[in-house]
Image (spheres, rainbow, N blue to C red):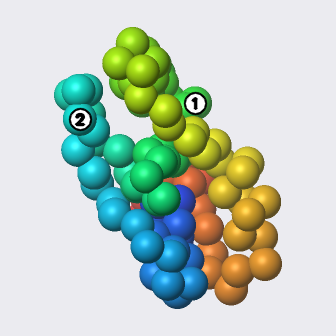
């Protein structure tokens, strides 16, 4: 069953017993980060090719930067490289087809 990148990353973190939180409210910013690992916020950027998503991403990135919040931005090509050897099928929403 295909998983979105956040689900894939979450599963890998759980499987490797890496302490983390997901859907973490970010103090000082009206935003929720995908993950927090080792006191670092992590955002999975999965649909940047869609205008509405890209605009929301740019606003969120600006809010983080304005508040001085450090974030690790993970883009689709990085997710694909990091988990290329996984047996889990990884598909981004842009690659999905509606039945």
**Residue 85 figure quarter:** bottom right
Could one spot residue 76 in this view of the protein?
yes
* 68 over 72 or under it: above or below: above
Q: Where is residue 71 in the image (x, y as percent from the top left)?
A: 50, 37
Seen at 77% across and 70% down, the residue is 84
Q: Position of residue 39 (x, y in %)?
A: 43, 52
* 19 over 25 or under it: above or below: below
Image-based side of 43 in relation to 52, left or right: right
Q: Position of residue 55 (x, y in %)?
A: 42, 18
Seen at 66% across and 57% down, the residue is 79
Q: Residues within 10 Å of mark 1 (few under 14, many from 20)?
A: few
Seen at 48% across and 59% down, the residue is 38
Q: How far separated are the C-alphas under marks 2 and 1?
A: 28 Å
Residue designated by label 2: 27
Mark toward the start of the polypeptide (2 vs 1): 2
Quadrant placement of the C terminus: bottom left
Residue designated by label 1: 49
Could one spot residue 55 in this view of the protein?
no
**Between tags 2 and 1, which lies in front?**
2
Q: How crowded is mark 2: few (under 14 residues within 10 Å), some or many (20 or more)?
A: few
Task: Give the camera-side residue of 23 and 67.
Answer: 67
**Residue 67 figure quarter:** top left
């Amino acid at each position: 069953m295909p998983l979105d990148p956040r689900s894939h990353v979450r599963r890998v973190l759980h499987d490797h017993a890496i302490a983390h939180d997901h859907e973490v409210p970010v103090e000082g910013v009206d935003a929720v980060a995908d993950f927090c690992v080792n006191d670092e916020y992590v955002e999975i950027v999965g649909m940047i090719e869609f205008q509405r998503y890209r605009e929301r991403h740019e606003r969120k990135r600006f809010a983080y930067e304005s508040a001085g919040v450090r974030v690790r931005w993970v883009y689709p090509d990085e997710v694909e490289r990091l988990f290329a050897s996984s047996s889990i099928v990884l598909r981004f929403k842009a690659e999905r087809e509606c039945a």
